[in-house]
Image: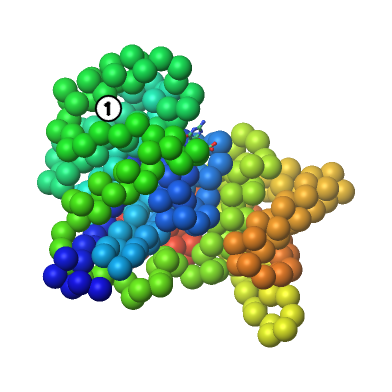
Amino acid sequence: MDETNFRSGFAVLAGLPNAGKSTLLNQLAGGLLSAVTHKPQTTRQNILAIAEDENYQIVFVDTPGFLRPQYKLQQTMLSCVDRAVSEEADVILFLVDATADYALNAALAEKLKTVYCPVFLVLNKIDLVKDPAQLDALEKQICNELKIAKKFRISAAKGVNVPALKQAVVAVLPVSPAYFPPGQWTDRWERFYAAEFIREQIFLLYQKEIPYSTFVEIEKFTENLGDRNFIRAIIHVERESQKPILIGKGGAMIAKLRERAQKRVEEFLGRPCRVELQVVVSPDWRNNTELLEKFGYIVRDEMPQ
Ligand SMILES: Nc1nc2c(ncn2[C@@H]2O[C@H](COP(=O)(O)OP(=O)(O)OP(=O)(O)O)[C@@H](O)[C@H]2O)c(=O)[nH]1
Ligand SMILES: [Mg+2]
């Protein structure tokens, strides 16, 4: 390792819900580290993923989709984006879904005008765009509005142009020692990912407000040597009426969820495990500061007003 040239820093992914931030994070870090679903607002907290070689260590930060908050949980999500963009970033990857209405980015674009680090424009989902002139026009509009250091056209899902984007990120990082010990690919514990991937399966299986009303708490996580891991998760819902929907007729839905969640968690951990699920009503938790704090969405010095 050449310490005089080693680069390290934080690359923050910011964009609207569903822009493809978590998909891109997984591609950049070469692993399934962040939950991806077709539903907006899947990601609720900043998630780090580390990519490194002997010359660099990039700490990618996946953030919740930028949106106007309507309840306290969303306020905490927005403060995650604010903190990452304003305080942590050495470079920001502004991810824009090339197939969506760009006007919805207005509030985030205003925020990006106030930052001091370089902003890369990353147009995503180009696999769905037939006419390149559409991308030219979108790029032009955004570059007129914002100071853009570099621009990219990618498909996060297919990995198109992702290596070039990664190289460009390395090039703008400061010369600095690594932030994390080598070989560490994230700052989170396995428990966090177990909860996150069970939640991902809830997002994929249930409709309407159900996914948004759930919080997954890992109550027990035991690694029995030579045996399957055991994970008991509590699914918190907001109202009594949501409980039977989650459970389904004769327990059919929760059985399906349990099976899928177990498969997903096993895939992530790379070892066999047994997942058990229980549904509990925690009234109106998304608006309850105490519960949001207990669930780890609020860190004490950033309570929403
Ligand atoms: N066709 C296509 N689909 C994509 C691409 N990138 C992401 N998607 C899809 O877009 C949807 C949203 O992707 P996510 O990665 O969860 O988006 P996100 O920005 O993290 O969303 P939030 O966590 O809700 O803010 C998923 O269904 C992805 O499979 C792409 O390059 N092409
Ligand atoms: Mg996400």
Residue 282: image x %, image y %?
59, 56
Q: Quadrant of residue 124?
A: top left
Q: Secondary structure at mark 1?
A: helix
* The N terminus - image quarter: bottom left
Along the line of sight, the residue nearer the viewer: 247 or 84: 84
Q: How many marks?
A: 1
Residue position for label 1 = 106
**Which residue does the image show at 37% across and 46% down from the upper left?**
163
Q: Quadrant of residue 289?
A: bottom left
Seen in the image, is 184 located left or right of residue 231?
A: left
**Which residue does the image show at 40% across and 72% down from the upper left?**
183
**Which residue does the image show at 76% across and 55% down from the upper left?**
259
Q: Amino acid at mark 1?
A: Ala
Q: Can residue 13 be spotted in the picture? A: no
Q: Can residue 191 be spotted in the picture? A: yes
**Which residue does the image show at 73% across and 75% down from the upper left?**
228
Residue 239: image x %, image y %?
63, 47
Along the line of sight, the residue nearer the viewer: 260 or 170: 170
Residue 119: image x %, image y %?
21, 41
Specify the farthest residue to the bottom: 225
Q: Residues within 10 Å of mark 1 (few under 14, many from 20)?
A: few
